[in-house]
Image (cartoon, rainbow, N blue to C red):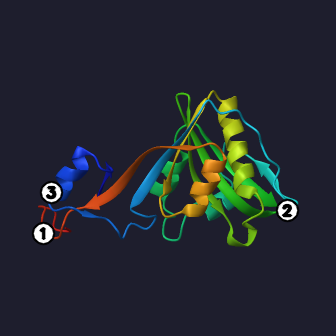
Amino acid sequence: MVQVVRDSPNERAIAAAGWRPATHHGAGHEVAVLTKRHFHVKVPPPGGHFHVKVPDEPTPGWWGLALRPGEDSAAARQVLAGGKVGYGVAAEGAVTTAVVRGALVDDWLHVGRLEVGPAFRRRGLASALMGAVQAWGAEHGAGHAVLQVAEGNSGALALYAGLGYALHHRYRYWVPAPGSCEDSTS
């Protein structure tokens, strides 16, 4: 599987070579990359009795929401824990209600794994966590942010647009057509 910038010469070339869009990709095969430059951080308070923080280590509850079913492995945990990372957590008492991950690369904050538990949605937790992880990033030298979101996730796209993120580019996941490669799995 490869990811290729949409409508690029590379995408036209792999399509001509018989590759197909990876429509089976679990998170969606069409992805928007959004950026926010020179952000000024405001941390909106969540509704209700929620506490939001961004520790430098993941909590057990963070892992519980951030990893989707079938993803929890030593390799996944190693990838998500590498580098300078902040693990945003919203909690109500001892219950983890929402999470986000922010990783620093130079002066860029790479945001990912935003997840709000189904019972806790529509309470401002995603906005509060985005504000908190951006504040964490700014404290550690980030001046810009980038994230990726499935194009079919209209709720997330609206959230990020409301937070000042703008489209940078789009990409698509592609796979070889059956029998088109030496790899026996294609």
Label 1 crowd bin: few (<14), some (14–19), many (20+), radius 10 Å: few
Image coordinates for residue 141, horizontal then vertical, percent: 63, 27
Q: Tell which tag, 2 or 3, sits nearer the viewer.
A: 3
Q: Amino acid at mark 1?
A: Gly
Lower sequence index among marks 2 and 3: 3
Label 2 crowd bin: few (<14), some (14–19), many (20+), radius 10 Å: few
Name the residue beneath numbered marker 1.
179
**Residue at image location 12% in from the left, 64% down from the top:** 180
Q: Amino acid at mark 2?
A: Gly
Q: CA distance from mark 2 to mark 3?
A: 55 Å
Q: Viewed as shown, does residue 43 lie left or right of 23?
A: right
Circle 2 SS class: loop
Q: CA distance from mark 1 to mark 3?
A: 15 Å
Image coordinates for residue 142, horizontal then vertical, percent: 61, 30
Image coordinates for residue 172, horizontal then vertical, percent: 35, 56
Name the residue beneath numbered marker 2.
93
Q: Verify CB contact (< 8 Å) between mark 1 and mark 3.
A: no
